[in-house]
Image (cartoon, rainbow, N blue to C red):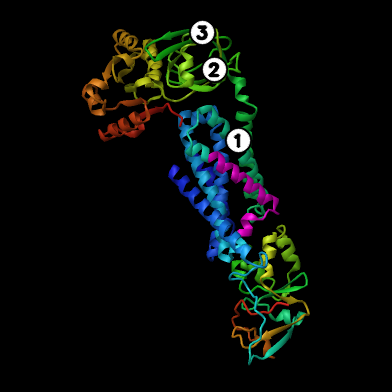
Amino acid sequence: MTKFVTVSLFIFIAIISGVAVVGFISRNNDSQPITANTGGANKQTGITGIGDTAASLTLSSAELAKHDSKQSCWLLISGKIYDLTSFAQKHPGSAEAIWFNCGKDGTTAFDTKGGNGSHSSSARAMLADYYIGDLNQTVITSSSNPTNPPIANPDGAAAKSRGEDEWEDD
Amino acid sequence: MLISVFAAIPVLTWALMLPLSGRFAGLSASFRSLGQVSGLLGLALLSINFILSARFKFLDRWFLGLNKVYLKHHIVGALSFGLILLHPVFLTVQFLIISLPSAYLFIFSFDSWALNFGKIGLSIFVAIMVITFYMSLRYERWKSTHQYLGLVLFFGGVHSLFMPSDISNNLFLKSYMLALTFCAALSYGYRTIFKLYRRNEYKYELSKVVKVSEKIAELKFRPLGKKIDFIPGQFVFIRFDSKNSDSKEGKTLAQSHPFSIISDPASQELSLGVKALGDYTSLLSELAPGQVVSIEGPFGSFSHTKASSKKQIWVAGGIGITPFLGMARAMKKEGAADYKIDLYYSIRNASEAAFGSELMEIAGQNRNFRFHEYFSGKNGLISAELVAKESDLSGADVFLCGPADFMKSLREQFIKLGMNGRFIHSEEFSLN
């Protein structure tokens, strides 16, 4: 029995201190707190390459409503639009909870955790990683990036698989 | 068995609440589920352990002896601690799959009070368990650290009931865990905080100390109030009401320790057999008559009266002779005529023998009782084979009492000789 305890204790100390140390170091290395991306979404350097055609997109409610599927899932939360396509499966509160709100205003759902309380500050920090822009804001997209959103197509719904990383921040 | 049932109920409920395929749909979800199960099971076992350690008489009956209850307590305690350690590990891994910063925040952000309670409870748990598993403290000092586990129950219980999750959303599961932790809290209150068991203690007064051998003494007590009722072979916990409880001696004597009863149930006097083994026991044989003692008990199912067969082999090692002495003294009674007992007393040499002459006398006076003294210093360790040469094992119940290794080894030997383990009874003296 003591063996089981020792092994568990060892794993516990290893994981917690590992996260603590590495997390602490990478926090200090980032110019920005917490919202630094590691495998998260979207901070583009914002430089449009030569030969790129810059397109603009207005994040209207109509635009939001187009991204109402698992393949392209945007949510409006407190006036900001987030692309949660890649995050849904990793959502601790189940993917369904997010998919239910694709293309819609998920403010209440997020603020109340679907009636289960409220999201922690760490969750809010995570959410920031998926920020596209504010509602009705016009954002720039770069077509040289192969994982661009399909928005540049006027017919809109070419919901190709989207990567996580190309939206330029404001 | 019973413990497993009570611990399994919440886990089964959790498993049946939602489709399991969804619970383990991906890597992240799987770790979340593992985190939930480990926390649930860990807390259930922790709660059960408080009930197990409260020295309830009904548990002594159910588990056939308080010593067996303590054995379970150790296993359950280790399991609950390991599981509760793994609970945040699994959840952290779930967040690591998302990102390192999210895992870091999970551990080091403190804005959820329910989560904070969990972290506090876990920290206290780790500190106390490290002391219990890895440090060798003196008994009283260790015991005082162990009693703080009540805090762990409080913080852990509140954490589990107020953390939003599908556990807190299921009414049955929530009620069950609330009830279980409440019973644990009641047990803790009964035993540790309010010490309610003291209401049922028997008050006795030390009347005589008889030195039986160099290190062994017989303490005789007479009742100051109600007489304790017991069967031969049982044990009690005694606590001296020390007048000078400020002195080191006073504090030591106020400790509660278990001893086998060696007197005949019919006798007015209560006799306990004591061997000087450490701080406490060394003080006992030096005591003067008149000391008042509080007695909790009786406990134990290690008794010749409880065996299925009246044909019995008793094997005692060292101070393990004490429960047998109590049983042997009862051999003179009328109802004992149809017993057939062979007592083997294994000691290193003659100077260690306690009560040897008395036992020989009992053997001489009773045809149902044979006494064999065995000196391991001269003839090597006693073995089941040697016993089998002198006694007929078929259909007999075997009773073993002595050092842990002694009992373990002999049990294995008797089983090898073809005996059914169910008919081999052992009394663990050490509750460690």
Front residue of B17/A29: it is A29
Question: Which label's residue is closer to the chain start, 1 or 3?
Answer: 1
> Which residue lies at the image location 46% right of the left edge and 46% below the top edge?
A6
Q: Secondary structure at mark 2?
A: helix
The residue under the point 34% across, 29% down is B407
The dot on residue B249 is 2
> Marks 1/2: CA distance?
25 Å
Judge left or right: residue B399 versus residue A129.
Answer: left
Which residue is depicted at the point 73% across and 65% down?
A109
Mark 2 residue type: Glu
Relative height, residue A21 to residue B386 (above, below): below
Can you identify the residue that label 3 sits on? B288
Residue B354, magenta (yes or no): no
Specify the subunit that label 2 lies on: B
Q: Is residue B110 magenta?
A: yes
Label located before the other in sequence (1 or 2): 1
Q: Main secondary structure of the magenta part?
A: helix
Residue B327: image location, x then y, percent: 39, 17
Q: Range of the magenta residues?
A: B104-129
What's the chain of the residue with tag 1? Answer: B
Residue B15 visible in the picture: no
Rendered residue at 56%/62% (across/down): B96
- B414 or A81: nearer the eye? A81
Quadrant in the rendering for residue A153: bottom right
To the question of a shared chain for discs 3 and 2, the answer is: yes
Q: Quadrant of residue A78?
A: bottom right
Residue B244 % position (x, y) = 60, 14
The amino acid sitting under disc 3 is: Ala
**Total numbered labels placed on residues in the image:** 3
Circle 1 sits on which residue?
A: B148
